[in-house]
Amino acid sequence: MRIDISKFGATLVSRPLGREAALGLMASALKPLPEGELIELDFSKVLVLTPSWTDEFLQVLHANYGQRIKILPSDNPSVRLTLETIGEPTE
Amino acid sequence: MKTDTRDKILAYIRENKSTTAKGMAAFFIISPQALFKHLKILLESNLIGKTGAVPRVQYVPLFLEAVDTPAFRWASAASAVEPPPNWYCPTNDVWQGRLQRVAPSLLRSGFDTGAVGLIAGVIGEISDNCFTHNIFAWPDIPGCWFEIEIAKKYLRCYIADRGRGILTSLRAARPQLATHTQALLVALTERISGRLPEARGNGLKFVLAALGQLAGDTGEFIIQSGPARFRHQLPVSRAVSSHISETAAYLRGTYAELLIKI
């Protein structure tokens, strides 16, 4: 399942909003999630991404879905730098 | 002699914050040709910038020698007063609403998409810290001063709070920190957070890395807490400690200033 992260907004900043986005995603698009299906996170349409939002968002998802989370590559410098800063590898 | 006149022109622009060539020519009683020759050199040296279109071009200082802005004076004043409503974000939701307008404004003013992501990300992480590190701990005025000026290919941003400051915040994780200078260096270079037991502390590392990627742009970044001030022209290098110094002007909270010209 591919998730377009820009649906949470074009400027993604702050931990509380990152956590809220993850919980909202779990309660909607990821429910139910077929057995074994991967969750592909697509940041390509996001304009501004920051470590605070992303770290919180991914912590919640990793805790619940572990290895099923895949991050798709992006050309956006703020996406690339954010993922590098928090130590998240892209696919 | 020419250098003396140029220094006086630079001092005039810094003092007036924003001025026209016509105003300067009248003040200095020199020919437009001579004035534009000095302005061209000052522009090429990145000491001043231009905003607006002909015939209303304004010349503005790009690098202020001392930090003397309304935001800094507010943050460092002994007595607490509310900032002007245009710049005051008393709560997180007010700040978020204003932050969301930064990236679209930068795009409209001529910044490319990649730079917008980095610049708005920098502004977002710095201002987010104002709330994150002071929630339920504001010594007097809550919230932050969030002042953004965007013109064609030009950004000037001031963020300040009257919170606890970096040293007090980081001592929760590292009690042995003794000085503001040590704390600022740690905040800018190490993965550490004042919000133990939560694992945080990436924000300012992201800020410096992002400002290091703005290689094609000119500008300056300042962040200060206590008397410790980091000041670096863009692009920011990895030599962080050599750009931190102690100043006479003290503030308890945190102040940041970002100027970018493309």
Image (cartoon, coloured by chain):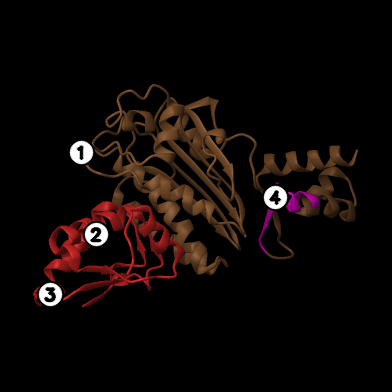
Chain colours: A red, B brown
The CA distance from mark 2 to mark 3 is 19 Å
Query: Can you identify the residue that label 4 sits on?
Result: B46
Q: Residue at x 83, y 49 (%)?
A: B38
CA separation in Å, label 3 and label 4: 56 Å
Label 3: state its secondary structure. Answer: loop
Discs 3 and 4 carry the same chain letter:
no
Q: Is residue B45 magenta?
A: yes
- Mark in the foreground, 1 or 4: 1
Name which residue type carries label 3.
Gly
Vertical comparison of B239 with A75: above or below:
above
Rounded to the nearest angstrom, the CA distance separating label 1 from label 3 is 33 Å
In the image, B116 versus B210, the foreground residue is B210
Looking at the rendered image, the quarter that the N terminus of chain A falls into is: bottom left
| Amino acid found under the numbered disc labelled 4 | Asn
| Residue picked out by circle 1 | B197
Separation of residues labelled 1 and 4 (CA atoms): 44 Å
Within 10 Å of disc 2 (Cα), the crowding (few <14, some 14-19, many 20+) is many
- Asked whether, in this view, residue B4 is left or right of residue B117, the answer is right
* Range of residues picked out in magenta: B41-52
- Amino acid on which disc 2 is placed: Leu
Q: Secondary structure at mark 2?
A: helix
Q: Who is closer to the viewer here, B81 or B146?
A: B146
Q: Nearer the viewer, mark 4 or mark 2?
A: 2
Judge whether residue B18 is colored magenta: no
Query: Circle 1 marks a residue in which chain?
Result: B
Q: In the rendered structure, find residue A36 and report the number of the disc placed on it.
A: 3
Circle count: 4
The amino acid at mark 1 is Pro
What residue would you read off at disc 2?
Answer: A58
Where residue B236 sits in the image (x, y, percent)? Answer: 55, 47
